[in-house]
Image (cartoon, grey):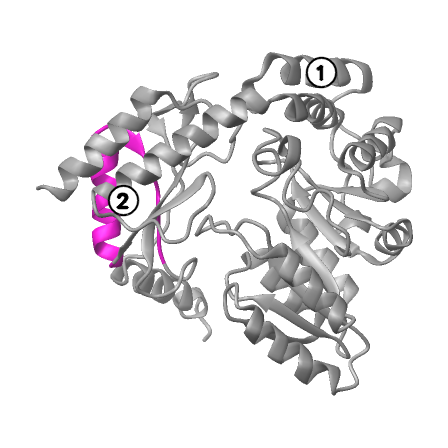
Amino acid sequence: MSDNKSKTGFIKDALDKRKEEHRFRALKSLEPVFGTSRVLSDGKELINFCSNDYLGLSSHSEVIQRSNDFLQKYGAGSGASRLVSGTLDIHRQLEEKFARVLGLESVLIFNSGFQANTSVLSSLADRNSLILADKKCHNSLIQGAILSRAEFKRFNHNDLGHLGELLQEGAKKEYNRIWVVSETVFSMDGDQCDIEGLIQLSEKYDALFYSDDAHALGVLGEKGLGLNFGKKGIDISLGTFGKAFGSFGAFVGCSSEMKDYLINFCSGFIYTTALPPSVIGALDASLDLIPEMETERNKLLGHISYLKSRLKELGFSTGDSTSQIIPIIIGDEKNTLQLSEYLEENGILASAIRPPTVEQGASRIRVTVTLNHTEEDIHHLINTLEAWKER
């Protein structure tokens, strides 16, 4: 172990294994064609069916204008963490605005959804706690549960019966608290949880409920305000800004007391520089726009419904998707990679999703539909998939 090669040999071994398993990942540099569904990859124009910019707000003129306004007034950075001097008046005002629009008691802004989930959950549970999370929860929630050092169990996906059994078992033990954790729309399958059922079970067993609304916010629910909107019995409502809001960051909706707790005990909040003013400006504009975009949402939902029906006609499985996230489940990893490559050859960017992101034998092309997609874009995707199937 004295020479450098032997010390780092594990890196090559791990990468070689990933390549053998068709799971190796590499970064792809893209240039967006502003305000469209297109991106340039090595000079080639592709229709992007991977984006989470569901409402196209990242290029909306009002979002860009307000971002620039805040940039000009406050500068490029916030200059410090929130507890030092990084809480500018615009951070506080935006939190109050989110609380008012979403009907929440309090809101606390974070720098990303991953940062929020890993650090919030780990600060709310300890080695004397129990965390029960849906098996298909996002990796950030899993990491948060692991970091908490709590006893961590995963209930079968959307299986309230299994969750009830685990809660019943947990109630017999001396945990200081029990957390139930789920997503409203699952990021790889596009299906929804039974949020009312989760709330009822949590209340029945006096458990706390953590609901990640990242992919529903902006697209689903009353006025596009998410599936957590208007629901009583959610102790932590998590939303993100890197998807339908078209920008970056995240927020936690909670009680005022819970907000004070997170400010004092959540390391992911305490030890990071506050979001820059330009981002706060963009979020402020998006929050004004989203509740008024009912016509646009109906158009988007129409495109989603049409695409799913055509995929079904072609014999593709899209699982239980009920949202803008549509998995085209192929199963085999090699075939999934080949389909992704075929799509790119025909002008479509649609990534292959493989284990460990999804379970073994469930590799898929994860398609997301956005407002930037035209009818022609969707027809081109359908025709290309049909041609691949008929080869």
Q: Position of residue 330 (x, y in %)?
A: 26, 53
Q: Position of residue 79 (x, y in %)?
A: 81, 32
Judge by depth and name the residue closer to the eye, 74 or 284.
Answer: 284
Extreme left residue here? 391
* 3 with respect to 61 (left or right): left
x 27%, y 26%: residue: 379
Amino acid type of the residue tagged 1 in the rendering? Arg
Q: Position of residue 257 (x, y in %)?
A: 91, 54
Looking at the image, is mark 1 or mark 2 earlier in the sequence? 1
SS assignment at label 2: helix
Snapshot quadrant of residue 49 = top left
Number of labelled discs?
A: 2
Residue 366 in magenta? no
- Magenta stretch bounds: 332-354
Q: Position of residue 162 (x, y in %)?
A: 55, 75
Q: Which residue is mark 2?
A: 312
Camera sees residue 310: yes
Judge by depth and name the residue closer to the eye, 157 or 340.
Answer: 157
SS assignment at label 1: helix
